[in-house]
Amino acid sequence: MTSTPASGTGSRPARATRRAGTGRLAAALLSPTLLVLGLVIAYPVVAALRLSFQVSHDSIDPHTGFNVTTSTFGLGNYATVFSGDRLLRPWWNTTSFALASVTLEVFIGVAMALVMHRAFQGRALVRAAVLVPWAIPTAMSGLLWKWIFNSQGIANDLLGTQVLWSRDGFPAWLSIVVADTWKTAPFIGLLVLAGLQVIPGELYEAAKVDGASPWRAFWKITLPLVRPALVVAVLFRLLDVLRMFDLPYVLVGPHKDSVETLSMVAFDEMTNLRFGTAAAYAIVLFCYVAVVALAFVRLFGADLIGRGTRSER
């Protein structure tokens, strides 16, 4: 009498074969995307990192009398970056823009989402109007606010005073924060609105039956359930503000100590043909943005890779 193997034991090689075939298919389908990401992202980062260690030296050729540029590899560019206030001041401007703008955008964006979520006549028109500032290109938005903050613009007319907003100082810094908040608060409002629309209405009805006030329902129901969408929106805005360049460059102008960001410093170094130093500033900014993103994800738990949707086995 012969014994037959268990069905589970006999099917293991077949399952392993199917799993290996699925893995090869997934790798084949993802390879074009990975190739494009490598060409668009990985190669420029590696090239900039290599260029940041390339130190240029100018000298006179004794035989021809011409200026000769030679390159060596070292930390000279980073020594230039970290010496003096050429790094600290733009770093503080970049960080202060991020803190002030994102904080205001969160409050205004959440308020916009709550208004757009309510049922009233003309809600579709209000939603479309709210999204108009976000749809305007940043350079055009900078020109618009440059006219508003002109010495004879509407901002001074409303305030009843004469403020030189484009002059270096706190008014210039404030104009950047106002313009950036006006443009990108609808972005946060849009993502928060998407989170509000998946909250069951039965939760609010139960809270109303239990006698909860609207303010308590907001803190106990709305805010916890909309938190994942809000965290992702804030993370995207932080990464966007930390690399800010076009808005202060168009609205106030370059070489202003109160609004010059790290991106503007790197651009200024590049236009003056100091490519190694410009690459060093870009790498420092890249590392700063990466550290902020990692700290934010660790602190607030932004579910960016879908771990929360993985099924337990």
Image (cartoon, rainbow, N blue to C red):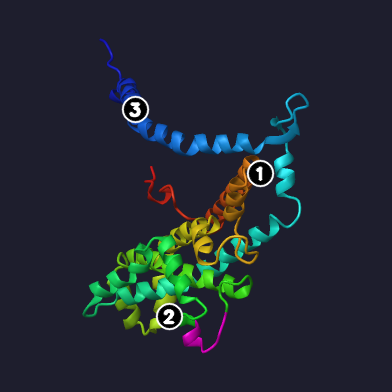
- Left or right: residue 55 compared with residue 12: right
Question: In which quadrant of the rendered view does residue 21 lie?
Answer: top left
Distance of mark 1 from mark 2, alpha carbons? 53 Å
Are dots 1 and 2 in contact, CB under 8 Å? no
Q: Quadrant of the N terminus?
A: top left
Of label 1 and label 2, which has the lower sequence position?
2
Range drawn in magenta: 156-163
User: Residue, x 38% and y 42% (percent of image)?
Assistant: 313
In the picture, the disc for residue 28 is 3
Q: Which residue is mark 1?
A: 277
Furthest-front residue in this view: 64
Instruction: Between label 2 and label 3, give the one nearer the viewer.
Output: 3
User: Residue, x 31% and y 82% (percent of image)?
Assistant: 209
In the picture, the disc for residue 216 is 2
Which residue occupies the foreground of this view, 40 or 235?
A: 40
Circle 1 residues within 10 Å: few <14, some 14–19, many ≥20: many
Distance of mark 2 from mark 3, alpha carbons? 51 Å
Residue type highlighted by circle 2: Arg
Residue 80 screen position, x and y as percent: 73, 46
Q: In the rendered view, would you say 173 is above or below 14?
A: below
Dot 3 falls on a residue whose secondary structure is helix
Residue 117 screen position, x and y as percent: 30, 73
Q: In the rendered view, would you say 296 is above or below 131?
A: above
Instruction: Between label 3 and label 1, give the one nearer the viewer.
Output: 1
Residue 255 screen position, x and y as percent: 62, 60
